[in-house]
Amino acid sequence: MNGKTKVIAVVGPTASGKTALSVELAVRYGGEIISCDSMQIYRGMDIGTAKVTETERRGVAHHLVDVVSAEDSFSCADYARLAKMAVEDISSRGKIPIFCGGTGLYLDSVLKNTEFSAAGKDDEFRERLENGYSPSELHCMLAEIDRESAESIHENNVKRVIRALEIFHVTGRKKSEWDALSRTAESPYDSIVIGLDYRSREELYRRIDLRVDIMMGSGLTEEVRALDSAAFRASTASQAIGYKEILSYLDGKTDLQTAVEQIKQFSRNYAKRQLTWFGRNKEIKWIYPDCAPRGADVFGYVVSQAEEIIGKVR
């Protein structure tokens, strides 16, 4: 026994089946789930984030879902603080914390015990960037000084791009260097990380497209219309895939069919970025549902593979 808190994490690209597996593991091992999704923390964003429903929860407690208003700001540091509190709470009651989600940055901030440093701020510099440059120009500026950070931050995530530029401006040190320094502390967790992916990219993309169709049929357009406000449009949440495309449709800038096709394409692109991120973590134990024996129950196969992984590590 190493004295560390044991946690399980189920990760992978969007639409890979993480929710169902995490709930099944929670039922079997006496666990509670901590969402690791950067958009499911927002209230009112249910359909477009594929937020777990009451039926899907099967009575399992879920944490870090519906934490703040969609108009509020919420950072990775905020997530790490709340997630660590959730882990302590769950484990103190003899339950196993089970992370579930596809936001690799959030998960790493907890499992790798990232210490978030107040590397310095310059409000005037940040305002100049916000008002004077396009997202593409800002991302190019970041790539020139810190290619590693530029590769890990999408150009549409303007707030994070500007923060990386601000850190370099104030401290003279790249954000990627600060990140490396922040991971010197040993993790207090003994973690088992299970990844879900598909050998067939066509199958994963089919699942993504189907999920988008289900979202549209479940009322995504109405959900976005209900959220729409000046405050929401100014928030980070409004840039989530599915929401920004429907907002464009509501503004008359595109037709609904084009908006839906964009959601599907951007979701597939996001899945690629997720797999790139998780691919760097050599500790992840991968399961491929499309490798189940012919005629076998696919979900049963996935669960048995997960139990085998957990059994070996424990």
Image (cartoon, rainbow, N blue to C red):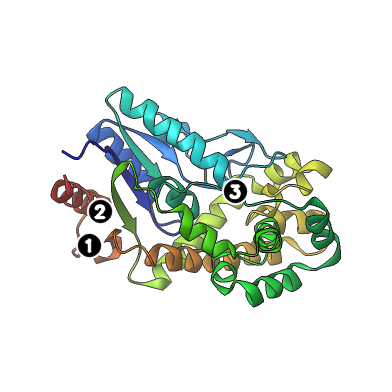
Which of the marked residues, 3 or 2, is nearer the chain's N terminus? Answer: 3
What secondary structure is found at the residue carrying circle 1? loop
Expressed as whole percent of the image width and height from the top left, the position of residue 260 reads 65, 62
Residue for badge 2:
302
Expressed as whole percent of the image width and height from the top left, the position of residue 201 reads 41, 72
Residue 278 in sight: yes
Residue for badge 1:
292
Residue 102 in sight: no
For badge 2, the amino acid type reads Val
Left or right of 225? Residue 211 is left
What secondary structure is found at the residue carrying circle 2? helix
- CB atoms of marks 2 and 1 within 8 Å: yes
Residue drawn at x 26%, y 38% as measured from the top left: 4
For badge 1, the amino acid type reads Ala
User: Which quarter shows the C terminus?
Assistant: top left
- Front one among 102 and 170: 170
Residue for badge 3:
48
For badge 3, the amino acid type reads Gly
Label ID, residue 281: none
Which of the marked residues, 2 or 1, is nearer the chain's N terminus? Answer: 1
- The answer to whether 69 is drawn above or below residue 75 in the figure is above
- Front one among 213 and 19: 19
What secondary structure is found at the residue carrying circle 3? loop
C-alpha span from label 2 to label 1:
8 Å
User: Which quarter shows the N terminus?
Assistant: top left
Which of the marked residues, 3 or 1, is nearer the chain's N terminus? Answer: 3
* Residue at the outermost top position: 93
